[in-house]
Structure formats: C-alpha cells, structure tokens
Image (spheres, rainbow, N blue to C red):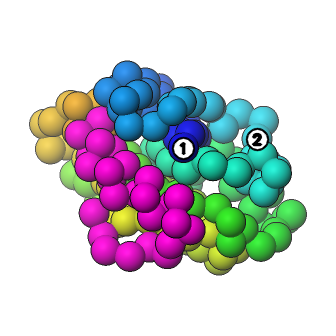
Amino acid sequence: MKLKILVGSMTHTADHVAQAIQMECADLADPVEVEWMDGLDIHVFDAEKTADVLFLVCISTYGAGDVPDNAQMLFQSLETQARFLGHVRYGVLALGDSMAHAQTYGFGGKRFDERLQDLGAQRIGDICFLDSSDGTHPETSGAQWCRAWLKYALPQASASGAAGPRS
C-alpha cells in the first residue's frame, strides 16, 4: 500500500518531517510519496486515484490557527467542492509551538482533521502533535511516530476499517 504524505508548511519544517518519514518508513509502505499541497484540491482524494493509498496530512499551523498558505486551496475546496470521502483513510501529523501559541497549538492539523471527518473520511489513530517547544527534533519524532502508526494503520486501511484503537 502506498503512503501519500500531503505537506502544508510555511517554513519547510513539515516538509523536513515528511522527508524523514519517506526515508525511515520506505520498508513499511511502498512507495512513500511526498507531495506539497500547492495547487491541490479535493480531487486529490478521488476514489479512482486513491485505490490502495493511505494518506498522511503533515501540516503546520500559521497565524492565528490557520492552515499554511500552500494548504489553503485544498482546505477550502473540502468545503466548496464537498463530497463524500468515505473511501479515504488518513492520519494527521500536526506541527506547532505550544509555548508561543498555546491557544492555537496544532490547529492546522485539527482543522484538516475536522473537515475530512465531516466528509466521511476515516482517520486511523490519534493525531500526532509535534511541539517545537519541547526540545526534540521533529524529524526524528515524526519518523518514529509514523513507523508505529503505519504498523497499525496499514492493516486497518487494507481492511477498510474505521479508526479503531488509537496510536
């Protein structure tokens, strides 16, 4: 099964995390594809394009809890072109800074998750929050989380299972 990582970022940190996941998890998913959200819309989730695909939304938070600029078109299209996405299985890796932005920490990921669930997509596991204020390297933490998540998520997605136990 293919892992498709959709990247939303202003400072490239989410891209660095996605690249680390691509390198560290290539033995679990075949292939691991990283795609920036620039220019994407809801059609990235079309059923005919997503057979045997597990999505990972790897996204930062910008401003007052907004999704990054490069993710705006996709995010808005989930409302303006809304359709049922029950065939979509996904995870969320949300980057943020809980010290500097306590009120909006991880909102980019939370907002995408809410919108996808509203359209019937099924998140597998809990959202992973990577906190830039905790002193860890997001690339390392993200890749470690993703390895554990994939071991649970791939069989769930293959079986078209719902969220099930949380990771």
Q: Amino acid at mark 1?
A: Met
- Compared across the picture, whether 40 is left or right of 1 comes to right
- Compared across the picture, whether 157 is left or right of 78 comes to left
Can residue 148 be found in the magenta stretch?
Answer: yes
Residue sitting at x 52%, y 66%: 159
Q: Find residue 20 and report its horizontal and vertical position in percent.
A: 35, 26
Q: Answer with the quarter of the image where residue 89 lies.
A: bottom right
- Who is closer to the viewer here, 38 or 23? 23
Looking at the rendered image, the quarter that the C terminus falls into is: bottom left
- Who is closer to the viewer here, 119 or 151? 151
Can residue 83 be found in the magenta stretch?
Answer: no
Q: Is residue 12 above or below residue 28?
A: above
Residue bounds of the magenta highlight? 143-167
Looking at the rendered image, the quarter that the N terminus falls into is: top right
Q: Nearer the viewer, mark 1 or mark 2?
A: 1
Number of other residues with Cα within 10 Å of mark 1, as a class: few under 14, some 14 to 19, many 20 or more: some
Number of other residues with Cα within 10 Å of mark 2, as a class: few under 14, some 14 to 19, many 20 or more: some
Q: Give the residue pinned by disc 1.
A: 1
Mark 1 or mark 2: name the one nearer the start of the chain: 1
Q: Give the residue pinned by disc 2.
A: 40
Residue sitting at x 86%, y 63%: 81
Residue extending farthest right: 81
Residue sitting at x 23%, y 31%: 140
Q: Amino acid at mark 2?
A: Leu
Q: Find residue 119 and report its horizontal and vertical position in percent.
A: 70, 73
Q: Find residue 97 and report its horizontal and vertical position in percent.
A: 29, 47
Q: Find residue 42 and report its horizontal and vertical position in percent.
A: 78, 54
